[in-house]
Image (cartoon, helix red, strand yellow):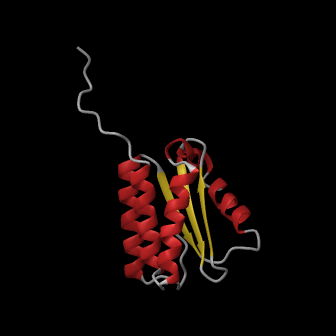
Amino acid sequence: MAAGELLSSRQREEVLRTVRLAQQESGLRFSVYVGETDDDTRGYARRLHGALGREAARSVLVAVDPQRRRLEIVTGEHAARQLDDRACALAAMSMTSSFSAGDLAGGIAGGVVMLGDHARQPRTLHTDRA
């Protein structure tokens, strides 16, 4: 996570903890970028996501540019099967609501939790077939 001076070390730890939990629950890889983007925030986020290489297909990137007041969620091909546009839009609405209240770290953490919960793999009670 690139956060510069925008998040304190405690806030970074909070976000990283929620990223780990979302990954455990969903089986997807989550990445968070907080910092400056260029004028094409969506393109910038897609390039960051693409830089994940082979992991990109199973990855979700949350990119936040607080200066431009921009948020992008990019899902890879496999991740998009677990996270549809509606789930991403709901998480984005939750995050932006927190951002407008001045809670950058809490908004990111809450959004990542929502994405992880929505992408959660169903638990199997029985794995043996009779």
Quadrant of residue 10 within the rendered picture: bottom left
Residue drawn at point x = 49 percent, y = 57 percent: 30
Provide residue 42's location: percent of width, then percent of height: 70, 63
Q: In terms of depth relative to the viewer, which is nearer, 91 or 37? A: 91
In this view, the residue in front, 16 or 118, is 118
* Quadrant of the snapshot with the C terminus: top left
In this view, the residue farthest toward the right is 39
Q: Residue furthest top?
A: 130
Count how many numbered circles sit on residues in the image: 0
Q: Is residue 33 left or right of residue 18?
A: right
Q: Position of residue 19 (x, y in %)?
A: 42, 61
Q: Quadrant of residue 68?
A: bottom right
Is 52 placed above or below 13 here?
above
Image point (47%, 82%), residue name: 7
> Going by the image, does 24 lie left or right of 43?
left
Residue placed at 46% from the left, 73% from the top? 107
Q: Position of residue 17 (x, y in %)?
A: 36, 66
In the image, residue 83 sits, relative to residue 40, either above or below, namely above
Residue 71 image position (x, y, % from top left): 60, 69
